[in-house]
Image (cartoon, rainbow, N blue to C red):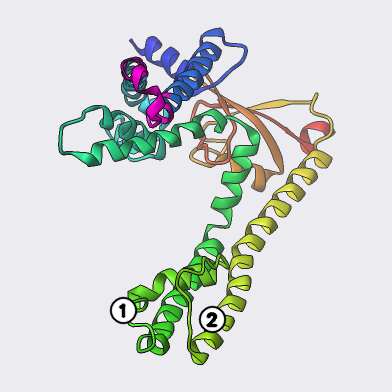
Amino acid sequence: MNKAKKRIFQIISIGSREDLPSLAFDIIIVLTILANIAVMLLSTFDGFEEYSSLFRGVEIVTVVFFAIEYILRIWTAELLYPDLSPGKAKLRFLVSFDGVVDLLTILPSVYFTGFIVFRILRVARIFHLFRINTGSDSFAVILSVLVEKKNQILSSLFIIVVLMIASSLGIYSVEHEAQPEAFDNAFSGMWWSISALLTVGYGDVYPITVAGRIMGMIIALLGVGVVAIPTGIISAGFVERYSRELNKEKGFTDIRELGEILVDEQSGLDGMFISDIERDHGARIYMVLRDDLTLIARGELKVRTGDIIILHSDKLSKQ
């Protein structure tokens, strides 16, 4: 059973073009996601009502496939999170992004009359499209930049929220008497403040008093800077990431000279993250061999005793 669990984990969680079952599973899951999204979109057209039975059949088949995959991922969660106990690993997967999306994908099929929320949850299936691109390096770069700059991005969003609340209160104060229907309360100005700050300017709600128009001009000008803040932060993150990758390529030009390190008590690497090992030891780690598994050396992967690290460093090339 242990070997079967490892094999299933390799197929559904570790994409490999050399492994035919793993490649076949990746292709099937992509086609299943696309089919599920396609029937969900086509079923909204009145002209395709005659195919409603076909759409329902395709939806049931794809959801059954998602349910099987969901169960298998829960079953193999302890291999995905080897540092946690089996119970905690399963709980960690259930609350993860993939686990929540998988659950929300299955729930809408349990439809009861009157429970409209279950139908609304069908929108969550769109997030399955992220599965198609999660294995690519470009997607990993985008995620790493967002995670790395999360504090700065959150700070900029906090500034936007503060300005949005302040502008909504301000526009209510100066426009309420002139436009009691448009600006009935402070929350009524929220729509205007969002459209003004984000420089959308739909024009359905706008100030008519002199003070309101002056405030509108100021908020519009502030909005240009507010939108530029998170954009600049993310752009700077991509530039920094590109510079680091370029430096790595220059520092490790001869990848033919590889070495391996056994993680044991003497190595002092047990429990360290891949990113920390690369930073502290000036090495480029390519993969980690763990039991019968070959793991991709991602920065958030934590090594443990018994692992074999495949790496390259200047120290190895000089020996």
**Residue drawn 58% across the image and 17% down it:** 16
Q: Can residue 159 be seen in this view?
A: yes
Q: Which of 274 and 207 is in front in this view?
A: 207
Per the image, the residue denoted by label 1 is 184
Mark 1 belongs to which amino acid?
Asp
Q: Residue at x 34, y 31 (%)?
A: 105
Q: Distance between the residues labelled 1 and 2?
A: 18 Å
Q: Residue at x 38, y 39 (%)?
A: 96
Mark 2 closeness class: few <14, some 14–19, many ≥20 residues within 10 Å? many
Decide if residue 89 is in sight here: no
Q: Position of residue 194 (x, y in %)?
A: 47, 68
Asked if the residues shown at circle 1 and circle 2 are in contact, with their CB atoms under 8 angstroms apart, the answer is no
Q: In which quarter of the image is the N terminus?
A: top left
Q: Residue furthest left?
A: 113
Q: Position of residue 249 (x, y in %)?
A: 80, 39
Tell me: 217 left or right of 90.
right
Judge left or right: residue 242 versus residue 127.
right
Report the span colored magenta.
39-59
Q: What's the residue at 80%, 24% (across, down)?
A: 256
Q: Quadrant of residue 175?
A: bottom left
| Residue 263, magenta (yes or no) | no
Magenta run includes residue 44: yes
To which residue does mark 2 refer?
A: 216
Q: Is mark 2 on a helix, strand or loop?
A: helix
Question: In this orientation, which residue lies closer to the viewer: 74 or 272?
Answer: 74
Q: Is residue 167 left or right of residue 319?
A: left
Main secondary structure found in the magenta portion? helix
